[in-house]
Amino acid sequence: MLRLKQAGSAATLTLAAALCLSVLMPGKAMAICYTPCIALGEGPIDNMTQVDELYDYDSDKHETLRDNVNEHTDEQFEQHKQDFMIEKVWDEWLRPNLQMLTEQVTSVAIQQMEVIGAFLDAKHQLETQRLFQQMAADAYKDYTPSEGLCTIASMSRSLGGSERNYEMASAVLSARSLSRQLLKSNSSASEGGVSDRESRFVQFQKRYCDRDDNTAGLAAVCQHDAAVPLDILNKDISFFRTVGRPVNIDINFASTTGNASSDQNDVFALQSNLYAHNLPETLQKGVMSQGSEQKKDTGEQKYMDMRSIIAQRSVAENSFNEIAALKAQGQTSVAMTATYMRAALQEMGISAADATRLLGENPSYYAQMEVLTRRMFQRPEFFVDLYDKPANVERKSVALQAISVMQRRDIFKSQLRIESMISLLLELEAAHQQETAQNVSAGIK
């Protein structure tokens, strides 16, 4: 640019004028160089001296012009900011578009939140449904009894009632035996041992006599009809046929009909033959007071000795009464239980008729325990049913433990009876040794 000025060319003057106009023209503030404007205003440049003076120019006019330019520039920038940037760009372009953008973004964000909320709702809903389904499945698994468990429960019904029948039958058999041995009224021994033997012999002739016994010598003694079943003959002396073999005996002392059943007569006859088969005669009042007290042979002493013998005999007889009572017929309400018990036997291959014959219409306590503690485990279905839900397997375990407790209790009662008999034998032996020692010390042979 310096070379253009030194040459004094028209192009330089023209450019300087344009630059000066651009600086001084209102509305187009562009401060570039003040020297050409000054030079242009003072006249043409003829030599280098004027050029140097132009570069060294620092007058008040220059300062004023510079201040005007700066002030004008600030005003133009401020006006540009206010008119163009704020009013035009911001108010007319940016702010409305940003507002619409914000509204659009907000709407989209809200829509996105709605979608996310729907996903969250669906998630919680599905989790809740899954939880309910899981709980329903657990409830079905844990609270749905299996067929095997129902079988145990069905065959255990009325077991308590049958046990009460067994206890009552044992008490009645014991009371009946005591009444007979004590020669009570309204019994076969009410008139003493002779009447007891006569009534038992008449019963033998009409019911238990076998014509072929004694080398057919009893043909003239037997008075029963030929239609008497063969399985009844000699049942009054056969423990196995009367009590040992059957699991259900038709003994129902709770019946109000007053008619003894066939099994009941057989048990009474067997009991009379096994215990106290030879009863003493009735002791009259005068006999009770006779005798010498020194010899201890008074009637009172004999009667008390007889009662002592009856007491000792009742200990041994109690086992017979308990065994017979265990097989006494159960309650009438157990009839429905018999259906399930017979079904369990049929699963083992036993026919319906044989199952009914074995268990009877109302199974006894012994028959029910026989199925629950033995027969039930002989069926393959029992082990197949063990492939079951864990909760049902636990229930079966508890049910079997309960059955085991009942069985152990029955075994414990049997052991108590054995211990009673052993203690009685020891007591009798001790009494015999004591009496022998007393006789030796007294010189009695």
Image: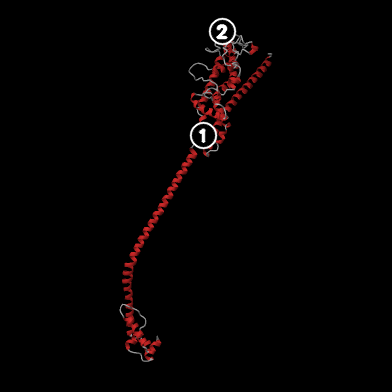
Q: Position of residue 59 (x, y in %)?
A: 34, 86
| Residue 118, placed above or below residue 314 | below
* Residue at x-position 49% and y-position 23%: 332
Q: Give the residue type at disc 2.
A: Gly
Q: Quadrant of residue 201?
A: top right
Q: CA distance from mark 2 to mark 1?
A: 72 Å
Disc 2, SS: helix
* CA neighbours of label 1 inside 10 A, class few (<14), some (14 to 19), many (20+): some
Residue highlighted by disc 1: 147
Q: Position of residue 29 (x, y in %)?
A: 33, 78
| Residue 149, placed above or below residue 251 | below
Name the quadrant of the C terminus.
top right
Q: Quadrant of residue 226?
A: top right
Instruction: Evaluate whether residue 408 shows in this view.
Output: no
* Residue at x-position 33% and y-position 65%: 95
Residue highlighted by disc 2: 286
Q: Position of residue 140 (x, y in %)?
A: 48, 39
Q: Position of residue 356 (x, y in %)?
A: 54, 24
* CA neighbours of label 2 inside 10 A, class few (<14), some (14 to 19), many (20+): few
Q: Nearer the viewer, residue 321 or 147?
A: 147
Q: Nearer the viewer, residue 444 or 394?
A: 394
